[in-house]
Amino acid sequence: GLAGGVAAAGLLAQPAAAAGTAAGTAETAGAPERDRRVEALLKQMTLAEKIGQLQLVGDETAARAALSGGGLGGVFSVVGAAKLNALQHIAVERTRLKIPLIFGLDVIHGYTTNFPIPLAQGASFDPAVAGTDATISAKEARSSGIHWTYAPMMDVTHEPRWGRIAEGYGEDPHLAARFAVAKVRGYQGDDYSAPDRVAACAKHFVAYGGAEGGRDYNTVDVSLQRLHNLYLPPFKASVEAGVATVMASFNTISGVPAHGNGYVLHDVLKGAYGFRGFVVSDYTGIEELILHGLAGDGADAAAAALPAGVDMEMVSTNYARFAERLLAERRITGEQIDDAVRRILLVKFRLGLFERPYVDEAAEVKAPSPAALAASRQVAARCMVLLKNDGPVLPLAKTVGSVAVVGPLGAATYDLNGTWAGLGTGAGTTPPVTVVDGIKAAAPGATVSYTPGCTVDGTDTSGFAAAQQAARAADVTVVVVGETAAMSGEAAARSTIDLPGVQQQLVAAIAGTGKPFVVVLVNGRPLTIPYLHDNAPAILEAWAPGVQGGHAIADVLFGVVNPGGKLPVSFPRAVGQIPVYYNHENTGRPADPANKYTSKYLDLATGPLYEFGHGLSYTTFRVDGLRLSGTRLPARGGRIDVTATVTNTGARAGDEVVQLYLRDPVASIVQPVRRLRGFRRVTLAPGASTPVSFTLTPDDVGFYDNAARFRVEPGKIEVYVGTSSAATLTASFTVV
């Protein structure tokens, strides 16, 4: 197993606050490779210069001050090639060893060109979507002098109240891992010293998505088996894909804050996974060990974080202030400092910063290129999920005479970008295409009106009458409702996840006209929308679609693009049902409507409103012909091929996502009722069929136990193949 032999109590027993703990020496973890360039530089460095490399600051003034004092590792959130070159000139020309700075930024879903939020990208069930975003974003960012992005975020979560669900890929570790790897490769390429690539950062390590109550930065109490089976797989996959850096998370993990948690950072990440890059703190994360209650002061915080495995400190300055003293007091070791510096310098060398510290200011990308805009539009449409389509109302005819666009987000610009947008050059100055303008461009012969009806989160209903009047005068109404960009993302937890304000009442007012209408959702998380499900003829989940959002929404509404996205996260029926997720464990009393004494709510139907993997199309599909290449899987080195046939049974071309789930019905650790282990998105012409195959190995059927050992146990495994987590086509094999 990856962390074989770690005791079940190990998670609780690793505060790593002193050099004498298991986290105390570089030898017990995967030390960075001994690069001759790094070793030569390290030998020349004074202790003060080494400690300087461990500091990361977030503004120009702090950077200049630190450089004048002799040492600084990097700068983040300073944007613009000229500004960055000016800082780099100081580091390279006015410091003794001429060590270049690394420049970082939160390039989350676009730099100059904004793409859909990551949760939306997960809905594409096509990792190439994340690769496209990362490739274009890396080129734009590097042209502006940025070397390093704080992405991808791969926090698996079952908590839609948590605002940062928008930044990840949903509730499934397999889906998140596939997207995280695609994004790492898109950012870094084969060689991240290339002028169109950046170093990636896997974040947040680890279990940040388990925040109690969905409140950002909150406590996480997690068993070892769930830590390793649910939260860690995307990080393991990212390390295997060569991710350059990792960021520690704000949360505690079973009582030990991640920034001082030697078990997760030292033993698992650097030890079991063999991670050779560096770990950066999150914003003031080391300082926050004091408020967490792990450290009494800044010196304690530094003495906890460095041995635990945090190599670079962001914003707070506890390493810079206390490392020399802690070394003299033997609370940290010179070896620990050297290990951290080695890791940081290795990434700087691999970025090519010593050979090419500056960027060509004339080549800075300040506006999206036509090719980048086209890619953003294509990606956005690929991410949309058709939740419902009675009638069918959609797609709309391009010959429609009149369209009323109603709703507070119908003419929104920056809200279509969602969270973490606008940090890069151009991203804040290129407003997204509105839904109104997208519809006007898609149906140039139609009369298109716009009436907001209300604000996103206000209580004023005086605009309803005008909205109803517009709907009555039009052939069809498109109601665009949801959340503002500020309602999701960091520090944006919501205690309820209904449509904010009076937007649901606005939809009811439009429904009351009796005229055809569709609802378009713009949002950064799942919403509780049973009213819409019961009363709206059609619902299109557009998420926060990015700079070409209006065009992409229109492409789907008018059938230029046949929607093929699937939900990467379950949609609850009510906030009181949270957490509700497909990959849950069974209970001894599974829900049974006929038996009161089973696991359910008295006042709510069992299961989500829309299940993980759900998504409709303008055509129909059939999946059949399930067959396995064998009925026995050897626990060592075996494989089984699973094949099914998918057929487009409708009248137009479209996409289907064939999904493979496994269930282990009897195991020493109770297993989820289903686990996604494969998916493939295919495009088929009307009447066309294609076989879709997946290969299963012992890795797919194994799991981590409560001693963090990976187990592959003999016994029956059930296979389910279909178009969502509710797939019914089934077969089985036996692990021997």
Image (cartoon, grey):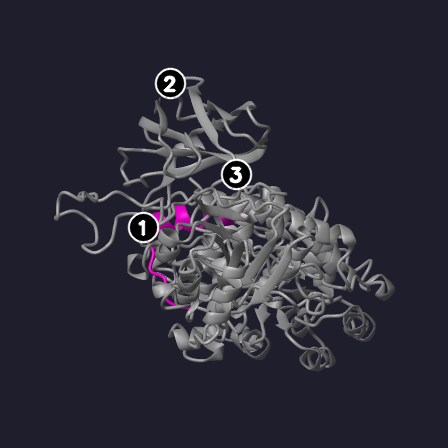
Identify residue type, mark 2: Thr
Residue 184 visible within the image: no
Task: Tell which residue pokes out farthest to the front in this image.
Answer: 473
Query: What is the number of the mark on residue 631?
Result: 2
Q: What's the distance in space between the residues labelled 1 and 2, CA to CA?
A: 34 Å
- Report the quarter where the C terminus lies: top left
Please indicate whether residue 38 sits to the left or right of residue 496 in the image: right
Residue drawn where x is 64% and y is 74% of the image: 57
Give the answer, above or below, for where 157 lies relative to 586.
Answer: below
Query: Is label 1 in a helix, a strand or a loop?
Result: helix
Most frequent secondary structure within the magenta stretch: helix
Pointer 2 with pointer 3, Cβ within 8 A = no
Identify residue type, mark 1: Ala
- Snapshot quadrant of residue 499: bottom left
Residue position marked by numbered label 1 in the rendering: 8
Q: How crowded is mark 3: few (under 14 residues within 10 Å), some or many (20 or more)?
A: many
Query: Is label 2 in a helix, a strand or a loop?
Result: loop
Pointer 1 with pointer 2, Cβ within 8 A = no
Q: Foreground residue, 475 or 79?
A: 475
The x, y position of residue 12, in whole percent, is 33, 59
